[in-house]
Amino acid sequence: MVGIGGCGNTDSWVNASPALGWPAQYGDAANSSYTTVTGATKLALSWTRSVKGSLAAGPALGARGYLALNAQTPAGCSLMEWETGNGRQRWCMRLLQGGGVGGPLFDGFDNLYVGQPGAIISFPPTQWTRWREPVIGMPTTPRFLGDGHLLVSTHLGQLLVFDTHRGAVVGTALDLVDGVDPADATRGLADCEPARPGCPVAAAPAFSTASQTLIVNVWQPGAPVAGLVGLKYRDGQLTREWTSDAVSAGVVASPVLSADGTTVYVNGRDQRLWALHATDGKPKWSAPLDFSAQTPPAVSPQGLIVSGGGPQARLVAFRDAGDHAEMAWRRDDVVALSTSSLAGGNVGYSVLAGMSLLVFDPGNGHTINSYPLPAATGYPLGVSVGKDQRVVVTTSDGQVYTFAPA
């Protein structure tokens, strides 16, 4: 006779965690723009659509073939969920406008989390609201904290932890910026996309489940430039650990955390890529880019760092050698407009000037393939890589291009 052993706690399977696709802009909570999916080197354009408005954050891809976008539209729907395979709309609804910089987030049950000015909202796989809770400001792209809890960081510097099932605040809210009017959720929103001082937190933070470390890019009122704040997550509560102005020219775009959560990579306004210790914000090294990177770098678990994009950005890759950066390769023959996305270590994707999708080898930077984005206008918002190897590119003018593996 086989005895029945003691029952352990099996609640973990119901805890919300990131979808196995590309759950939010820049992929994971660390903003690594990396997926373990083996990238397809040959693609075919599957379908294109327009959100009939503008976009300021890339799409979220769920594991079951769903795509979500938080658009800004003159009328009608703004939050949209489509089927990735054919572009058919599943549902849509209109959110309070002005918060396009905050992208949506999918969990593994196809629930969606997204902000609007003054609130964070969760939707089930249908369009009915699961819960809606007030916040001070506009939420940037939300983050999962590894224990079923949701991190919400607003553009006015409020940090909150939510129970994903009930929508209840866990612990105590933390304010990174003093003197904020809690009744004015839209103050400074126009400064968020161009990353000007009126928007204290213009980009989504980076969180590492490996080190339980949170890094936020904060432009304090009256400060000449934006700096970094490091926090720890313990027992459902965030505590501030350090503030760093090591990047004296100021930081721009979201920070990125290494796979082990010990190193922060961030762009400086001094046209350098910076690496800082996640424990205290002190610099490890900086490397010259000779261009302004306006989007975050991509970072693989193997330690490859591919520079972010911008109007004059080149495609440059480094390896972190501890106290200095070793250049792996550099391509001055292309202008990379977007953050690159790395798939499985063997394939990289980036959107180039002239609006084409580049497929490249991360090992040496060499071109594998290139595909035009027909009639694309505006600027690209990065590349999302799905669990099924589909590749999705969006532009600020609201265009969506979906490629399938050929």
Image (cartoon, grey):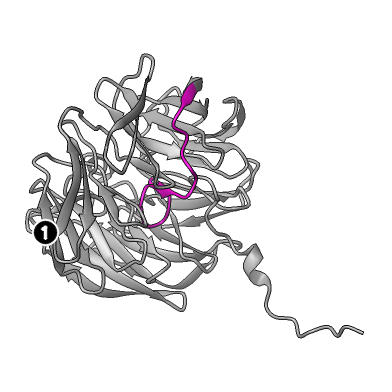
Residue 66: x and y in percent read 58, 38
Q: State the image coordinates of residue 174 (x, y, percent, origin top left).
A: 34, 69
Q: Is residue 403 visible?
A: yes
Q: Nearer the viewer, residue 142 or 12?
A: 12
From the image, give the main secondary structure of the stretch colored magenta. loop
Can residue 227 be spotted in the picture?
A: no
| Residue in the image at 35% along x and 55% along y | 154
Name which quarter of the figure residue 374 lies in: top left
Q: Determine whether, in the image, residue 324 is placed left or right of residue 31.
A: left
Query: How many numbered marks does the figure carry?
Result: 1
Viewer-nearest residue: 3 or 126: 3
Residue wearing tag 1: 247
The quadrant holding residue 89 is top right
User: Camera-side residue: 105 or 369?
Assistant: 369
Query: From the viewer's perspective, is residue 141 above or below residue 335?
Result: below
Q: Under tag 1, what secondary structure?
A: loop
| Residue stretch rendered in magenta on the structure | 26-44
Is 266 covered by the magenta stretch? no
Which quarter of the picture shows residue 241?
bottom left
Is residue 351 found left or right of 292 in the rendered image?
right
Give the residue type at disc 1. Val
Kindly identify the residue that appears in the image at 52 percent across and 69 percent down.
Answer: 147
Residue 2, image x and y in percent? 88, 83
Q: Residues within 10 Å of mark 1 (few under 14, many from 20)?
A: many
Residue 188 vs 369, above or below: the answer is below
